[in-house]
């Protein structure tokens, strides 16, 4: 191998050096999840978590991890401070006859920057050109580019004078669990909802309620977690088309993920949602059904001001409108004030986690947050606020 190119991924054997791309604010929670799923050398970065695993562990993450958007497997890293260095480094990165023979389609996504490589689209194009030029030289034929369903999804990250070239194990974003055909107004992404639930520490032993549940994402993710329903079962992933795909190992990991559901047979405590819009409530119901948790959820039509919690104490979670995307701030202030009153009257002893995109509105709750965790929700700077209701 030429000097300067660091191969981190021998094709057979050796640990996988991976990066999980995660929602901003959930880095530590995702690091805990990855550790619990058997990863080693786990370290949170910005919007990402670095880890090492074996192939079985990498498969396990695709089947069981709830927080990542993507799981990347590093192929090579090399110094990169110009477009020519990128071009050469990519060509020398791995034995492309194994990973990308001309009959294999591919796609390149890029993030980050390097000198002369300030536009990710251009950087991706540079990688593509390096690969098809190499193929033409070696085999007189080239791979086709397939943006929607490639055989190999490559990911380039540029930063700190280095290029990191990885394979995207899923091909599409892992937040799309497949149960959510219907979406209410401003729904949370499924992995963000799962991460928010993880931050509450809810473990399925006390009631959980969302008095403004929208299409139900927080409650559905919570119920799926408590019932051990692995998010990746029933999906196909890009890694199933990799040259070193091990169908037996994949099957083993699928069986282990399936067995998690069979193991959790204890009845769950009440998981209650309320939504004032009948059409949105219907979406929550159909999502819960598609997600296999309809029986576990009690979804009610009504105004959160009329919410009656189940016997508690338990945990309230909610993501009320905050005026940025739906509703107006002035009109929303009375809603927050009423919500604060309702909770103090009826939910004493419960704990509340509220996703806020607007500190002025949360002031109207007239409650003091004991924790404020910065979270980005679709690019909006939010706080996951924790209150003890007295
Ligand atoms: C930001 S959305 C919640 C999204 C939800 N977390 C999801 O993932 O689908 C806020 C929801 O609160 C509902 N809502 C607004 N005012 C309400 C009220 N007074 N009572 C009950 N629900 C209300 C809206 O209809 C909307 O569906």
Image: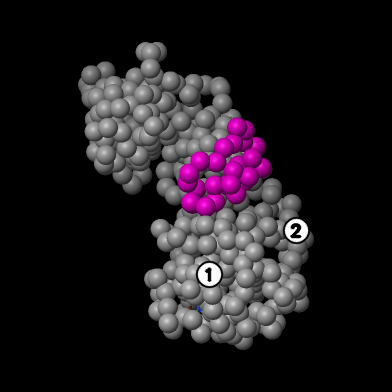
Q: Position of residue 165 (x, y in %)?
A: 39, 31
Instruction: Decide which of tag 1 and tag 2 comes sooner along the chain.
Output: 2
The answer to whether residue 224 of the structure is visible from this angle is: no
The answer to whether residue 80 of the structure is visible from this angle is: yes
Identify the residue at horizontal 46%, vertical 31% (top origin): 74
Q: Position of residue 75 (x, y in %)?
A: 44, 27
Stretch in magenta: 22-47
- Residue picked out by circle 1: 319
Q: Position of residue 189 (x, y in %)?
A: 48, 59
77 relative position to 223: left or right: left
Q: Decide whether residue 355 is among the magenta residues.
A: no
263 relative position to 27: left or right: right
Numbered marks: total: 2
Q: Is residue 126 above or below residue 321?
A: above
Q: Nearer the viewer, residue 165 or 268?
A: 165
The crowd level at tag 2 (other Cα within 10 Å; few <14, some 14-19, many 20+) is few
Q: Position of residue 362 (x, y in %)?
A: 53, 73
Identify the residue at horizontal 69%, vertical 73% (top origin): 389
Q: Is residue 189 above or below residue 115?
A: below
Numbered tag placed on residue 360 in the rendering: none
Identify the residue at horizontal 44%, vertical 84% (top origin): 331
User: Dot 1 lies on which element?
Assistant: loop
Identify the residue at horizontal 34%, vertical 19% (top origin): 92
Q: Quadrant of the C terminus?
A: bottom right
User: Is ligand 1 within 8 Å of the beta carbon of the residue shown at mark 1?
Assistant: yes
Q: Quadrant of the N terminus?
A: top left
Disc 1, disc 2: CB below 8 Å? Answer: no
For residue 35, which quarter of the picture?
Answer: top right
User: Is ligand 1 within 8 Å of the beta carbon of the residue shown at mark 2?
Assistant: no
- Residue picked out by circle 2: 265
């Amino acid at each position: 191998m030429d000097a300067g190119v660091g191969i981190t991924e021998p094709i057979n054997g050796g640990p996988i050096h991976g990066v999980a791309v995660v929602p901003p604010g959930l880095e530590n929670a995702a690091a805990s999840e990855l550790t619990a799923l058997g990863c080693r050398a786990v370290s949170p970065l910005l919007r990402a978590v670095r880890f090492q695993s074996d192939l079985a562990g990498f498969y396990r993450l695709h089947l069981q991890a709830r927080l990542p958007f993507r799981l990347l497997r590093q192929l090579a890293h090399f110094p990169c401070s110009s477009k020519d260095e990128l071009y050469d480094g990519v060509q020398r990165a791995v034995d492309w006859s194994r990973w990308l023979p001309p009959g294999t389609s591919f796609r390149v996504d890029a993030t980050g920057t390097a000198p002369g490589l300030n536009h990710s689209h251009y950087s991706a194009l540079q990688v593509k050109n390096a690969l098809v030029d190499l193929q033409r030289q070696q085999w007189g034929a080239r791979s086709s580019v397939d943006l929607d369903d490639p055989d190999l999804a490559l990911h380039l990250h540029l930063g700190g004078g280095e290029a990191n070239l990885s394979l995207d194990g899923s091909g599409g974003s892992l937040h799309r669990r497949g149960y959510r055909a219907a979406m209410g107004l401003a729904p949370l992404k499924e992995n963000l909802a799962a991460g928010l639930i993880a931050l509450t520490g809810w473990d399925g032993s006390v009631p959980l309620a969302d008095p403004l549940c929208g299409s139900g994402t927080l409650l559905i993710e919570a119920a799926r977690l408590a019932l051990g329903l692995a998010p990746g079962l029933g999906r196909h992933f890009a890694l199933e088309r990799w040259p070193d795909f091990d169908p037996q190992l994949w099957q083993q990991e699928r069986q282990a993920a399936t067995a998690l559901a069979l193991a959790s047979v204890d009845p769950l405590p009440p998981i209650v949602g309320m939504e004032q819009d009948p059409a949105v409530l219907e979406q929550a119901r159909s999502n819960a059904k598609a997600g296999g948790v309809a029986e576990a959820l009690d979804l009610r039509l009504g105004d959160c001001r009329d919410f009656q919690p189940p016997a508690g104490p338990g945990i309230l979670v909610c993501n009320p409108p905050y005026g940025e995307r739906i509703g107006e701030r002035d009109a929303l202030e009375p809603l927050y004030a009423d919500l604060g009153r309702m909770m103090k009257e009826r939910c004493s002893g419960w704990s509340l986690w509220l996703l806020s995109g607007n500190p002025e509105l949360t002031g109207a709750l007239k409650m003091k947050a004991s924790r404020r965790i910065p979270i980005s929700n679709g690019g909006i700077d939010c706080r996951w606020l924790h209150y003890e209701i007295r």
